[in-house]
Image (cartoon, rainbow, N blue to C red):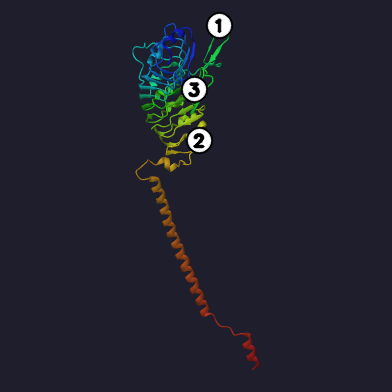
Amino acid sequence: MISKCFGHLIGNLSVLNLEQNNLNGPIPEAYTKRCKLQIFKVNGNQLQGKLPRSLENCKNMEVLDVGNNQLSGTFPFWLESLPQLRVLVLQSNKFYGPITQKPKVVADSHSPFPMLHVFDISLNSFTGKLPLEYICQWKSMLVTDKPQLAHYISWQNSSSLADLIYEVKLKIVSKGISLEMEKVIETFTTINLSYNKFRGNISVAIGELRALMGLNFSANDLTGQIPSSLAQLTMLESLDLSKNILSREIPQRLGSLTFLAVLNLSPNHFTGMIPQDNQFGTFSVASYEGNEGLCGFPLPKRCGITERALPPASIDSTSLLDWRFVIAGYCSGVIIGVLIGQTMFWRIIGCFKLTSRMKRFKPKQKSKKSKRHGRGI
């Protein structure tokens, strides 16, 4: 366990990294107003209980990573009071409940999480609708003007006695792969809400998150269609909507996402033609598996004009129309064949009769041999 007397050291610490140990029990309530913590990491332990409310006293906190533990409770809205927080990882715990609009106790004049760039609450038991309207209040998710010289999230000792730099490492799921980032650039922006119990439609408000580079809503109970406003996320590099109940067509406007490198839409209930513009020509069949209604490259099922024009029905109208053409062509071919055959037959019969008549009335000629014999006699 983490000893309660550990709190006496917090006043002087800027970086606390206890990740990948065998710690259990609660995280002590030991963070006073003198807290100078900027980086707090306890990922990969067996810590239990609730996230200590006293962490809101650490106003300089930039990285809070408590992923892969057994912490519980509802979403900690009180973390909004940390103005410098850039990374929040609650991944793989036992958090539960809806994430609704921010409570009224928070002043409306202050934007929640104004600096947050990495938000990972995957593998929990959060419920209700996707909190996109709430997330759209986070200024850092909306700003697209990136500095030309971006810096990495780190801590540097200001003392002249030593030049110490601590660079943040982070374990996240990016572009469909679980990886450890040796360095986290300040402009890296991602949202991971996967493997929860969110339901309902994807709000059109998603189009406001124009600074996003990674978006993962996989393994929830989402329904409806992909909003075309998602095409406004021009910085997006990774999109994962797999393992939901989404339907209808994939918006053709998504072809304008020129930075999109990873796409996973399987399995869902999408139908119609796959967009063929820009990056969509580079994705493999695996991006669309489990969507029987989809057609077009790279799937072997091609989108015919007839297939797209005809409405769905209880009987396959396309197949019925094809059989009508086949039967009509077959019948007409048989009729024409019979007529041609009959004409040819009567012509042959006529030629045969004419030949017989000519042979019957042709005069017989005497042979030269008989004439010679007659003269000699």
| Nearer to us in this view, 105 or 278 | 105
Q: Badge 3 is on which residue?
A: 171
Mark 2 lies on a secondary structure that is loop
User: What is the crowding at mark 2: few (fewer than 14 residues within 10 Å), some, or many (at least 20)?
Assistant: some
Mark 1 lies on a secondary structure that is loop
User: What is the crowding at mark 3: few (fewer than 14 residues within 10 Å), some, or many (at least 20)?
Assistant: some
Query: Distance from label 2 to label 3 (Cα)?
Result: 26 Å
The C terminus lies in which quarter of the figure? bottom right
Q: Earlier in the sequence, mark 2 or mark 3?
A: 3
Query: Distance from label 1 to label 2 (Cα)?
Result: 52 Å
Q: Badge 2 is on which residue?
A: 284
> Is residue 77 positioned above or below 215 on the image?
above
Q: Earlier in the sequence, mark 1 or mark 2?
A: 1
x and y percent of residue 66 in the render? Answer: 44, 18
Q: Badge 1 is on which residue?
A: 159
x and y percent of residue 118 in the render? Answer: 46, 19
Q: Amino acid at mark 3?
A: Lys
